[in-house]
Structures are given as C-alpha cells and as structure tokens.
C-alpha cells in the first residue's frame, strides 16, 4: 500500500505543484453519510471509470455494505466483469497495452483521494477542468493536471469547454499565461449544476473507497475523547487524594 501511495504521489507531482501554486481548488463538500450520493457515485465510477481504473483494495461485498446495497443489487447492477462478490474490484485491461494507448498505465483509484492533501477537493476540481486542446494527442487537456494522458471520458455528460487565459507581465518583464475561466462550446447531457453534483457524488464514492471506516473512526473518536475527559477528572481526584499528606 505504501508503494501505491508513493507511486500516486509521483504521478500527481506536476499537477500538485501547479494547483497549489496557481490554482484554486473548489470544495467538494461531500457527505459520506449520504448513501444515495455514494450509490450515485458508484454508478458513475462503474459506467465511466472502471474500464481503465481498478479499485484493487476494495471488495465488492465490502462496498455493498458501505453503500447500503445488498450483494445481489451489486451483482445485478455494478459487476460488469466475471468476478465473485468477495473479490477485489479490478478490470481486465492489459497494463502494457494501456500504457501504449495513454502514455502511462491508468492508476488504481483505491487511494486517489488520500494521495495528497485536500485530495477530495483536488479530484473534484480535476474532473471539472478538462478543456479542448488540439495540440494534445487526445484533443483535451486539464488545468489541474497539465498534459494529462487521460481522455475526457465524461464529455458526453459535461460537454466540451474551452479554457480562457490572460497574459500578464511580472515585475521582471516576463509574460505568463494565467487561467481566466472556462467557456462552454458544446453542451452535454447535464447542466453545469447537474454535472457538478454528479462529480461530487463520484468523488464521495472514491473518498469512501479510500477509507471505508472513516465515519466509524470519527464516531468512536468522540467516545474516546469523552472517556479521556472523564478519566482525567478521576485521575486528578486520585492524585489529590494520594498526595494530600505531602501537600
């Protein structure tokens, strides 16, 4: 797992540097307790992402439990490869072939939102930041991840947009291009707000996959802090009792 996180960090390093230095990351504002959101995000993942990206650290039956689905519902609606319900979520894409198609093997997405700080916000912004770029082999680029090898597989939903850039001159007289926004040139099946909501659900699902026990950890953390607070009072009173003759 450590090797995978390290590999993802290396893969995302150029994008991280650019986004942290010049780009504002939009808040994903996800709710991991919203089962409907997680289920909708799973739908988008399996329909648009699973062909290239695996979730090798998540099993189908564990996913069913976390999303509030039965195993039969998962098998009927979310299993598009000949796997068993207790097996990890992997795909059949050949790694060498995919590296030739995209320039790099599509990474596993199990820990994508944990690969960097603000990972959910980064992914949410990235999925909404593709724009047309005729100079690229696949005709698209991404503001958050420049020269990305991934095609814009969600273009039918979002549509196609152009990136607008301003040219600014710094104090040394050097000109730089700065991102100024997007302009929609071909509408998709979803409106802007609907697409943003869909990507928020997708990010919520991938965030859940990265740490399925996050809500349970937070719930238990509250009880642990309460226990420590009560124990502190008891320990303080015992200390006073044991040391009363000394003081």
Image (spheres, helix red, strand yellow):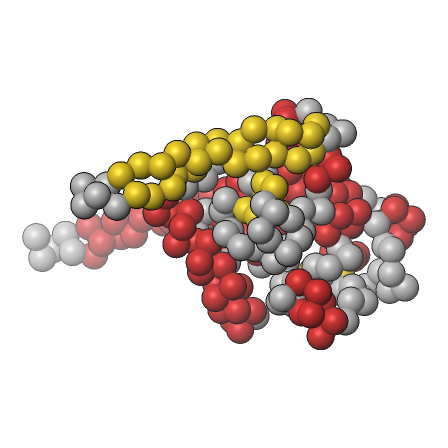
- Residue lying furthest left in this view? 247
Picture quarter with the N terminus: bottom right
Can residue 197 be seen?
Answer: no
Q: Position of residue 157 (x, y in %)?
A: 73, 35
Nearest the eye: 12 or 165: 165
Apparent side of residue 172 relative to residue 31 in the rendered image (left or right): left
Apparent side of residue 104 relative to residue 60 in the rendered image (left or right): left
Nearest the eye: 104 or 82: 104
Q: Position of residue 223 (x, y in %)?
A: 48, 45
Nearest the eye: 102 or 73: 102
Q: Position of residue 241 (x, y in %)?
A: 21, 51
Q: Residue at x 79, y 47 (%)?
A: 47
Can residue 105 be seen?
Answer: yes
Q: Can you tell which quarter of the image residue 150 is in?
A: bottom right
Apparent side of residue 90 relative to residue 1 in the rendered image (left or right): right
Q: Residue at x 39, y 54 (%)?
A: 17
- The vertical placement of 239 against 121, above or below, is below
Q: Residue at x 73, y 59 (%)?
A: 52
* Numbered-mark total: 0
- The vertical placement of 241 against 68, above or below, is below
Q: Position of residue 228 (x, y in %)?
A: 38, 49
Q: Residue at x 27, y 39 (%)?
A: 169
Nearest the eye: 208 or 198: 198
């Amino acid at each position: 797992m450590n090797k995978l996180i390290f590999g993802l960090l290396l893969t995302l390093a150029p994008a991280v540097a650019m986004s942290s230095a010049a780009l504002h990351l939009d808040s994903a504002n996800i709710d991991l307790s919203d089962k409907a959101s997680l289920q909708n995000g799973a739908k988008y993942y399996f329909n648009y992402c699973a062909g290239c990206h695996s979730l090798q650290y998540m099993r189908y039956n564990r996913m069913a439990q976390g999303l509030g689905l039965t195993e039969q519902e998962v098998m009927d609606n979310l299993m598009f490869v000949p796997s068993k319900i207790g097996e990890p979520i992997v795909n059949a894409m050949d790694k060498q072939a995919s590296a030739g198609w995209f320039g790099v093997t599509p990474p596993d997405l199990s820990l994508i939102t944990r690969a960097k700080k603000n990972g959910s916000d980064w992914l949410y912004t990235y999925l909404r930041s593709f724009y047309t770029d005729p100079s690229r082999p696949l005709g698209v680029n991404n503001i958050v991840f420049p020269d990305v090898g991934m095609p814009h597989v969600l273009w039918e939903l979002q549509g196609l947009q152009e990136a607008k850039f301003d040219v600014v001159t710094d104090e040394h007289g050097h000109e730089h291009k700065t991102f100024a926004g997007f302009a929609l040139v071909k509408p998709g099946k979803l409106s802007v707000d609907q697409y943003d909501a869909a990507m928020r659900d997708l990010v919520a699902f991938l965030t859940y996959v990265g740490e399925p026990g996050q809500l349970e950890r937070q719930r238990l953390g509250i009880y642990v802090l309460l226990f420590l607070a009560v124990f502190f009072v008891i320990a303080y009173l015992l200390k006073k009792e044991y040391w009363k003759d000394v003081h």
